[in-house]
Image (cartoon, grey):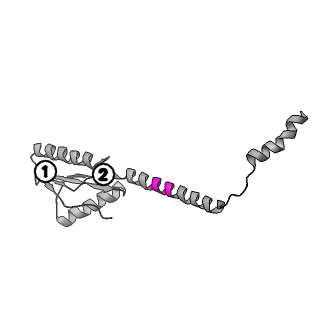
Amino acid sequence: MDGILAGLPEWKERFFAVEPARGGARRRRRTRIALLLVLAAQSVSQAARAADWRYCYAGSDADRRFYVSQPFAASKPMETIERQWLTWLGRQGIRFETTGCPRGRDRATIEDSVRSAARYNQGLGRRTLDQDWTPES
């Protein structure tokens, strides 16, 4: 047993000894900066993925019209976007019975949704009118 323990300090020194390397502090700082940059890039990427694509609409049976906004990427809460849409409709004097701001995973999905909604409303006898509106930042 003494033979095994006798070799342990030498083995420990060889494999676990940490000697400061030249430029060690500089290398550690660079490593930390690189790690922070990677984490920041991941956060931005996740925020971009979290953004919904939306459009807003308002339908009027009385006027036989279907008002549609431009597609937009939205990171604000839905309630905020809908409130801005309703405020804008009021300023324009647009009357409506139905309204909403559907969402999709990307712009192409929203554009398909707008086309489908326009076809549906055309079947109801409503004319689709594109509106130059996007929510305020």
Disc 1/disc 2 C-alpha distance (Å): 27 Å
Q: Residue 131, position in %: x, y?
A: 18, 59
Q: Which residue is mark 1?
A: 61
Residue drawn 14% across the image and 44% down it: 119
Q: Residue 45, position in %: x, y?
A: 42, 53
Residue 112: within the magenta? no
Q: Amino acid at mark 1?
A: Asp
Q: Which residue is mark 2?
A: 53
Residue drawn 30% across the image and 51% down it: 53
The quadrant the N terminus occupies is top right
Q: Residue 83, position in %: x, y?
A: 30, 60
Q: Residue 74, position in %: x, y?
A: 33, 56
Which range is magenta?
37-43
The circle on residue 47 is: none
Q: In which quarter of the view is residue 77 placed?
A: bottom left
Q: State whether the magenta stretch is mostly helix, strand or loop.
A: helix
- Residue farthest toward the right in the current orientation of the protein: 2
